[in-house]
Amino acid sequence: MEIRINKEIKDYRESIFFGLTLRQFFCSVIAVGAALGIYFGLKNVLGRETVSWLCIVCAAPFAAAGFFNYNGMTFEQFVVAVIRSEFIYSGLRLFKSENYLYNMLQEVEQNAEKPKQTGKKKGS
C-alpha cells in the first residue's frame, strides 16, 4: 500500500467522488447536464453530428472551469482578474522614476552656491 504525501500542505485536495474534488465533481455534473440538455433539446431540430459537436462545445467550458487553476486562482477568480486588469483598470500608465540621490545632490549644490549671511548688517 502506498500513501501519497504532498510536499507542500497547500497542494492537498480532498477527493470526494471518483478521485475528484467537490468543485471538480460539481462542474463535471453541470457539464454533463448541459450536454444532455442540449442533446435532447436539439436532436430533432439539427442533425445528430451537429448536435454532438454542439454538446462538446457547450459542455467544455463547464468541465474546464472545475479543473482550471492558475497561480492558485480558480476559473472565476481568474476571469475577474482579467476583466479588472484589461478593462476596469486599464489605461495609460505613466512610469516616472525619481532619483532621490540626484535630487539631494542638487539641493546640496544649491545650498553651497547661496552666499552665507553673517549676523552683521551692512551700514551699522
Image (spheres, rainbow, N blue to C red):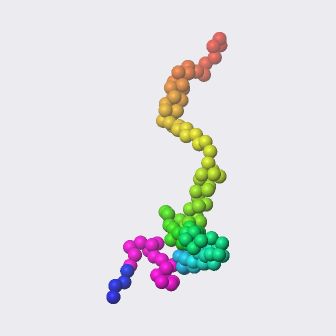
Residue 22 sits in which quadrant? bottom right
What is the quadrant of residue 47 in the picture?
bottom right
Q: Is residue 65 visible?
A: no
- Would you place residue 44 above or below residue 91 in this image? below
Q: Quadrant of the C terminus?
A: top right
Nearest to the observer: residue 123 or residue 96 = 96
User: In the drawing, does residue 23 fall left or right of residue 12?
Assistant: right
Q: Is residue 2 above or below residue 115?
A: below
- In the rendered image, residue 24, in percent from the top left (x then y), is placed at 53, 76
Quadrant for residue 111, please give it.
Answer: top right
Please tell me which residue is depicted at 59% across the width and 42% down the height of the picture: 93
Query: x%, y% of residue 90?
Result: 61, 48
Residue farthest along the top direction in this orientation: 123
Magenta residues (range): 5-21
Asked if residue 110 can be seen in this view, the reply is yes
The percent position of residue 35, horizontal first and vertical second, equals 59, 75
Q: Nearer the viewer, residue 108 or 23?
A: 23
**Majority secondary structure of magenta residues:** loop
Please name the residue shown 50% across and 67% down the image.
69
The residue at the point 59 percent across, 66 percent down is: 76
